[in-house]
């Protein structure tokens, strides 16, 4: 059971990082306290999300961000946290 929990945490961390990359969040250098709070909420939502398998399938099927809002509760947060120069 413990291994299954660790595998799930690893999977969600990997997918979260991929979403940050796709929405150009990792290129931001100027994070406000409000942004940091939004990021922390997004991490919590990801951990509680029941769409991990849908996310995994979506990541494997596309390189962009189109369709993320169909399953991801963090799409709006990723858009807000993303690099405005890449929007």
Image: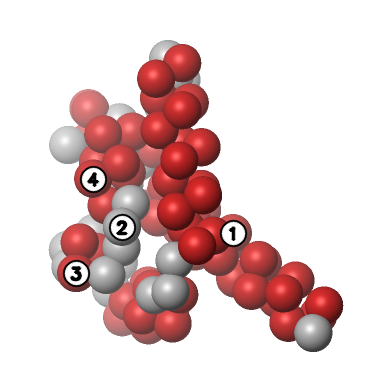
Q: Which residue is mark 4?
A: 76
Q: Which residue is at 32% across, 76% downward?
A: 58
Secondary element under disc 4, as helix, strand or loop, is helix
Q: Position of residue 37 (x, y in %)?
A: 46, 28
**Residue at mark 2 to residue at mark 3: CA–CA distance:** 9 Å
Q: Which residue is mark 1?
A: 13
Q: Which residue is mark 3?
A: 70
Q: Position of residue 51 (x, y in %)?
A: 39, 75
Q: Is residue 17 visible?
A: yes
Q: What quarter of the picture does the C terminus occupy? A: top left
Q: Position of residue 65 (x, y in %)?
A: 23, 59
**Residue at mark 4 to residue at mark 2: CA–CA distance:** 8 Å
Disc 3 residue crowd, few under 14, some 14–19, many 20+, Cα 10 Å:
few
| Residue 51 sits above or below residue 83 on the image | below
Earlier in the chain: of badge 4 and badge 3, it is 3
| Residue 1 sits above or below residue 21 on the image | below
| Residue 2 sits above or below residue 46 on the image | below
Secondary element under disc 3, as helix, strand or loop, is helix
Front residue of 4 and 27: 4
Q: Which residue is mark 2?
A: 73
Secondary element under disc 2, as helix, strand or loop, is loop
Q: Is residue 27 visible?
A: no
């Amino acid at each position: 059971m413990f291994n299954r929990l660790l595998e799930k945490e690893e999977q969600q961390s990997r997918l979260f990082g991929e979403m940050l990359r796709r929405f150009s969040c990792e290129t931001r250098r100027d994070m406000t306290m409000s942004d940091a709070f939004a990021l922390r909420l997004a991490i919590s939502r990801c951990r509680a999300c029941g769409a991990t398998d849908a996310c995994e399938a979506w990541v494997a099927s596309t390189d962009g961000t189109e369709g993320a809002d169909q399953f991801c509760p963090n799409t709006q947060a990723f858009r807000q946290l993303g690099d405005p120069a890449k929007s």
